[in-house]
Amino acid sequence: MNSIIYRLSCAVALLTVYPALAAPPAPQAPLDPSRIATHLEAELKTAHQAIENHGARMEGLLAPSLRGDALATEARALRSEFPDFIRENPHLFEELLGTLQTLERPSPEALPKQGPGMVRLLNEQLRQGLHRFGQRVGAPPALVVSGGVSLGSYQAGFLYYYTLFLHDRASVLRAIPPANRDSLRSLGIELPDEVPSGFTIVTGASAGSVNALLSAYAGCRAPERNPSKSLFFQTWNTLALETLLQPGSVGTDHTFSSKPVMEAIERLKSLDPSGWQQCRFSLGATTTRLQSREIDLAQAGNIRSRSGEQLRLARFTEKFLLTAQGDTRRAPEFCPFPGCDGQPPPGPTFYPRLAQPEGGPIPLDNVFNMVAASGAFPTAFEPRVIAHRYFDTRTGQWVEDSTARFADGGIYNNNPLDLALRMSQWEAAPLRGSHRFLYFDPNAVDWKWAPEQTQPFAGPGLLATYEQLLAGFAGTAMSAQLMDTLETEPEVRERIDVPVRHAPLAGEYLLAMSAFLDEDFRTFDFHRGMVDAWHFVSKESDTRILFEELAHANPEAPPTTVGVDSPLFACFLAFEQSVADEPATLPACGQLQTEESQNVLSLMAVSRKMRKDPTLALGNNFERFTEALATRGYVFRSGLLKGQTASALQGKFRQVFGDAVTELTHQQPGSQQLGFQVATKLALDSAIAYQPVPFYSLVGITSGGLELAVSPSLMHWKEKELRLRTGMRVSYGESVRFSNGVSPPDFDTAAYVSGAFGFGLAPIRFEAGLGLLTEASYIPETSKWVAVRFALEGSVMLVAAEHLEISLRPRLYLDGGRASSPLYVPTTTSPNAPQQFEAMGLLLGAGWRF
């Protein structure tokens, strides 16, 4: 027993140094290590003493005869005496708590065969839990970051805070004396001898590649405690729509300028040399070839010798693997994975290698260019040429390639967990296979979206049968690689941590680009990411156990886990831990009552309000967001929307992005412009908001002739619009009958002006209108105009893809079909003037809008 207590006191020694992780804001008192040690030692002594006492009694109740009720009472009493960190973490102490659960509801076949081993069994199971805990706390960290477009600001805030935590964790673990480390090892808590200050493996796709690189670099730098001065904030805060859509940024294959992205990444070249620290990390990034390369399915000699076509695979997704090593006052230098000591990459030769000079490191320009290519979303950013070489399975030779172009790696693999796992398995010892993976995807939230009110297809039928499959096809295709990884490596699920998002963000709307529109949006999302990292570190991951114990030991000054020098973050954290609806009511937010901070405080209140709304759904969250901001009088302080209210957000984004896409359309070959214009407008109308065609001209045919018309848009709201239309029609027929019964062929010419109300969702829309028509009839045989008539004309039109129009037009003549009507205007004095004509008419038409 004494030896156990001694070992447990060593565990206490480990935890007494963890106050370095806590940086409570003033005016809290400093943490008292002796109080923490006393508290934890008392808890652990109580746990082992409880096992000794209750375990001995349970041994007596198990043999020679079973006394079930008394045994269950002892088991429940033992459970109640365990400290919270054992009782509340069954995933760590599953064997110990499972045994107690069995004893609390005894069944003879499930109980131990012999009673005297109960104390030994329970102590061994406690040891297993402590060993598991040590593995999770001390495992080298690996990172997987998905794409997220402007949600990269949120990801950056989370990873900024988490990389600070990793740095502080390393400082604590390194401070453990060797004697205590040995004792902890004998107890079952295995801690690494070398503790990295940051992530040892980082992988990402799309925007996640940029944040993966920043996270790796953060582990090589002295910690920056001011968020606004961090690499993460300075990188993402500059990415605004007005910088991405610079004059001349639109090209034949892209809409945005890549210059701001490259400038943000290349800031890493000019960092203060004094901030570099010794570090080592491996970087993996997925990219997508625009033109595939072929890989033989098999490479056996007998297959190679055959003539004809071989079975080959088209490889579009390319994965670049690098390792970087840095030192004090020296920036990291990159080399091929898994190390810079010349050892060849393990595994098959499917992975390309970045170009590098012989005997030297990979140039930073090549590395940064590859990261930018991984985030080059198709049609948004220009595909990039990556100088590299790959192994040609057909010739068995390495091939230099400086012409192939690459785009976003998230097209086929947006969650490169498979790459991170493979890199862990191929890492150099002692890191090989020991990593714990932080899998970071902003789509993981801690609330349930309200179900969408959708009308399923009527069945039975083809669409009804395959509706669910088609609806989930895109998402399933993008996550197929992830599912394959879990199937082939099921044990990896125990090594993955998945943080969850606790609040709606400002950047998750408008194709996840809304944060590009407003600096305050990006600031809010960044700090919201920091708050969610605080949640994860102190409440959701296994490290929370440490901080819960610190809080129990020192209730006057509960730890905040990571020291951050930011009044704004202190306000965010205070608001997160309160039940207030308005952050402005909290003392921690009092000093932020300035014009510059009002928008961020409004976003905090709006996000909380939305989070509490049980009817919040993916289909209505943007509408709720803009309505809540408009109610608060939110006015944009920067960017393209500067000075405008929140109600302008959707329309302005649609206009700006639509103008850019229109310019992109004009860059296409003439034969492709019409199809491109139709497709892109339909996509933007569906994904963002309907934008009416400002003006169109129409050329059409009718049931009797031809029609020309023009139409400007007067106003619109959501998918509804009001238009003015004026036009002319010419038809040839026999519509005039003279008093002698003769009905000669005549030309009817009509001019009209009408208003039309449009509604419906693209690609099929409807218009209903009413207007005034003036019609004149001309008879070639007599070379005379014989009458002018007036009519009210209605219209019902179906419009496909904003171009093809099919119309039905009933009209009612105001003269009632009577020549005696004052609204009938004869244009001839011939006694043989028209006497009979239709009182109503119906016209069918089809036309093309330009």
Image: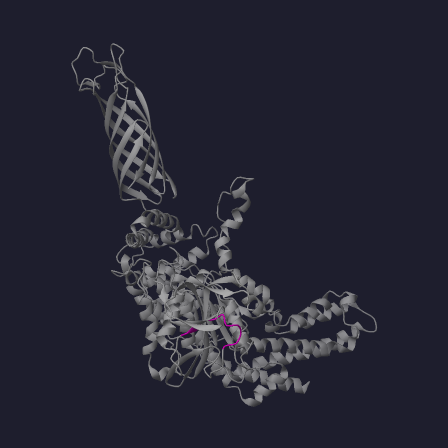
Q: Quadrant of the N terminus?
A: bottom right
> Observer-nearest residue: 756 or 342?
342
Above or below, comparing residue 793 to residue 557 in the picture: above
Residue 326: x and y in percent read: 41, 82
The answer to which quarter of the image holds residue 802 is top left
Above or below, comparing residue 289 to residue 173 in the picture: above
Residue 794: x and y in percent read: 31, 29
The answer to whether residue 220 shows anywhere in this view is: no
Residue 258: x and y in percent read: 32, 65
> Observer-nearest residue: 54 or 485?
485
Main SS, magenta residues: loop
Going by the picture, which residue comes out furthest to the left?
Answer: 829
> Observer-nearest residue: 848 or 243?
848
The answer to whether residue 203 shows anywhere in this view is: yes
Going by the picture, which residue comes out furthest to the right?
Answer: 64
The magenta-colored residue range is 345-354
Total labels: the figure holds 0
Above or below, comparing residue 690 to residue 595 in the picture: above
Above or below, comparing residue 361 to residue 748 in the picture: below
> Observer-nearest residue: 799 or 584?
799
- Residue at (60%, 75%) from the top-left corner? 132
**Residue 175 lies within the magenta run:** no
- Residue at (53%, 71%) from the top-left corner? 421
Looking at the image, residue 753 sits to the left or right of residue 512; the answer is: left
Looking at the image, residue 158 sits to the left or right of residue 119; the answer is: left
Name the colouring of the figure: one colour
**Residue 347 lies within the magenta run:** yes
Q: Quadrant of the C terminus?
A: top left
Residue 737: x and y in percent read: 26, 15
Looking at the image, residue 449 sits to the left or right of residue 365; the answer is: right
